[in-house]
Amino acid sequence: QVQLVESGGGLVQPGGSLRLSCAASASLFSFTTMTWHRQAPGKQRELVASITGGSRNYADSVKGRFTISKNHAENTVYLQMNSLKPEDTAVYYCNGEQLVGRTKYAYWGQGSQVTVSS
């Protein structure tokens, strides 16, 4: 069973930075795509950033402020968040997808609270 363990959330002032980490129990090479999602109170979960091979994509709301990256040696995916705004407040979830034959498996981290407030 693949596990994704997140860390790095917390409270930060507007304009500040945080880095989220997502440590996988399997090699990152076994995942076709790694993504970060977030869910604010009363809102649906939304895709924030994705990385597939060397291709990165971002939601319009975070472009230019957030960066997704991965470290294969550590089997860890990161989300660097700069210039944080109060509207970035949410629980952030890491997700990894594996394709085994024709079957797609999706794994989620436990969630990490990010609060942007003065």
Image (cartoon, helix red, strand yellow):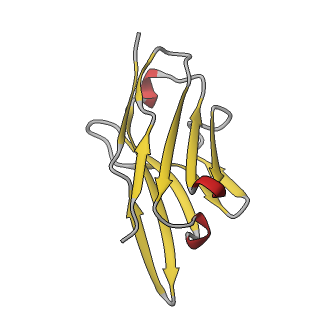
Q: Residue at x 60, y 41 (%)?
A: 60
- Does residue 83 lie above or below 63 as drawn? above
Q: Residue at x 49, y 89 (%)?
A: 102
Left or right of 55 on screen, residue 36: left
Q: Nearer the viewer, residue 104 or 58?
A: 104
Q: Nearer the viewer, residue 41 or 72?
A: 72
The quarter of the rendered structure image containing the C terminus is top left
Left or right of 41 on screen, residue 55: right
Residue 52 position within the rendered picture, expressed as x and y whole percent measured from the top left: 64, 63
Residue 105 position within the rendered picture, expressed as x and y whole percent measured from the top left: 42, 75
- Does residue 42 lie above or below 30 as drawn? above
Residue 73 position within the rendered picture, expressed as x and y whole percent measured from the top left: 65, 56
Q: Nearer the viewer, residue 92 or 47?
A: 92
Q: Residue at x 57, y 57 (%)?
A: 75
Q: Residue at x 56, y 72 (%)?
A: 30
Total marks shown come to 0
Residue 46 position within the rendered picture, expressed as x and y whole percent measured from the top left: 43, 49
